Image (cartoon, helix red, strand yellow):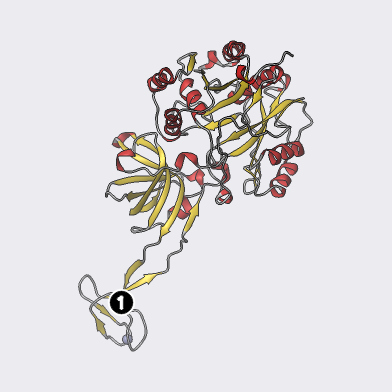
Amino acid sequence: MPYESKDDLKVIHIGFDDTDSISGKCTTNLAFKVVSKLTERGVTFIDYPLLVRLNPNIPWKTRGNGAVCIRIRTDSSEQIIEFLLKIIKSESDLVNGANPGLAIFEGESIPFSLRQFSGRAMNDVVKMEEAEKLAVQLSVQIFKYGQGLGIIGALASIGSLLEGDHTYEAIAYRKNEYLGSPRMLDKSKVSKVDINTYPFTFNCYDKIHDRILIAPHGPDPVFCGIRGEDPQIVISTLHEVMPVEKLEGYMVFRTNQGTGMHLQNELSQNEIRTHRAGYVRCTVTKKPVIIRGGHVMFEVSDFSNNQYPVAVYEPTGLGDVASKLLEGDSIDIGVGVSMNTPHRTNILNVEYLSILKIAKEIVNINPLCNKCKKRMKSEGKNKGFQCKICGDKKYSKISVTNIRDIQLGMYLPCSKAHRHLTKPLHRFGMEKNYPHVPNIIKPLHSDWFKRF
Ligand SMILES: [Zn+2]
């Protein structure tokens, strides 16, 4: 190879999203194919491919609402862009309603406005026109297919540096000939690695429901994915559960999965809009009721005294604790806001519940007879109370404080109901950083990408 001076090398950031649909194909698998090709070309990867999960409350999102960003240093950016245009078109599920978008940005550092845009895509609704306008301002090349909605996620993934908390996922892919056939995974192996790697992996296995959580069920090319705290643990755990089926290969993504990133902003009064995500600090104003299906409904008010209905859905497993809340309890709730159509009001759908302060429960009960130590009986409305043994009378009830059957603390949905972004309880306190310093390339794990 001829010697290339460093000046010929350019940093390019490749973002894409919305290449998949319900019936198959998969954005992360496209990323695997892209990286495979880029590896042959000998580019330098300046970060792991990012798998960025965006606001999960967007109804028109693709399955997991995950966008991918690949950051490389290369001397042949033009040929690479040409290749990307071809592969996005051929590997996207356009006929089945995918609306892919591809974004390419050149430069060492990511402009602040792009980072801000990415932040908003985490917890708000971003319009395609905004994405297009920003792309023009920052000279980001964008390419739309279908309706092109994917350019929002494509841009957002480039703007997302995941400098704060992050996790990793090693995703293994199937060979074409196995697509659609059942995934043969050894449940006992998976439950064993789940125990042995705790707390450095998460969502491998659901003990309570005896279910494997690492494998999807659809026809898509993902065989399984191991989520965890660092590249080494996800790679070694993947090797431990490796199936008999011959796989195409695997790749390690750096992700915001399991970080609760979409719920980190506090939603104030004018920010509670349909499809938004965040947390609300509030007081319970209406006692919970359990409705059909086991869902729990109650009402809260925020600091500005706005009242909101709150829903805790049965599958989250949070209904039990939520049903014990009472008026006056102070709570934080991580929520997705949705529209309660018949009432045209917003409803807060709970993703986590943190109980900050438990109100006293005062109940009024009939007085005791001083002599007989027995509870007096009511004589009827406003007629006072009488002891049935000695006939003594009293005229008012007494107030007592009930002991509440509820504890302060953080309550999270059960792992079966976890979304990609849900932060598992044991990850609190395990948050980490990944500072982005332009020009400094952190070495990646030597086995982060493998084709078998
Ligand atoms: Zn008495």
- In the picture shown, does residue 438 fall above or below 405? above
Figure quarter occupied by ligand 1: bottom left
- Residue drawn at (58%, 51%), measured in percent from left and top? 426
Q: Nearer the viewer, residue 31 or 424?
A: 31
- In the picture shown, does residue 58 fall above or below 288? above
Looking at the image, residue 132 sits to the left or right of residue 440; the answer is: left
- In the picture shown, does residue 138 fall above or below 410? above
Q: Nearer the viewer, residue 208 or 434?
A: 434
- Residue drawn at (67%, 23%), measured in percent from left and top? 180
Tell me where residue 336 sits by quadrant: top left
The residue furthest right is 244
Q: Nearer the viewer, residue 73 or 346?
A: 73
Label 1: how many residues lie within 10 Å, few (<14), some (14-19) or many (20+)? Answer: some
Image x and y of residue 340, in percent = 34, 36
Image x and y of residue 442, in percent = 64, 34
Image x and y of residue 153, in percent = 49, 25
The residue tagged 1 is 377
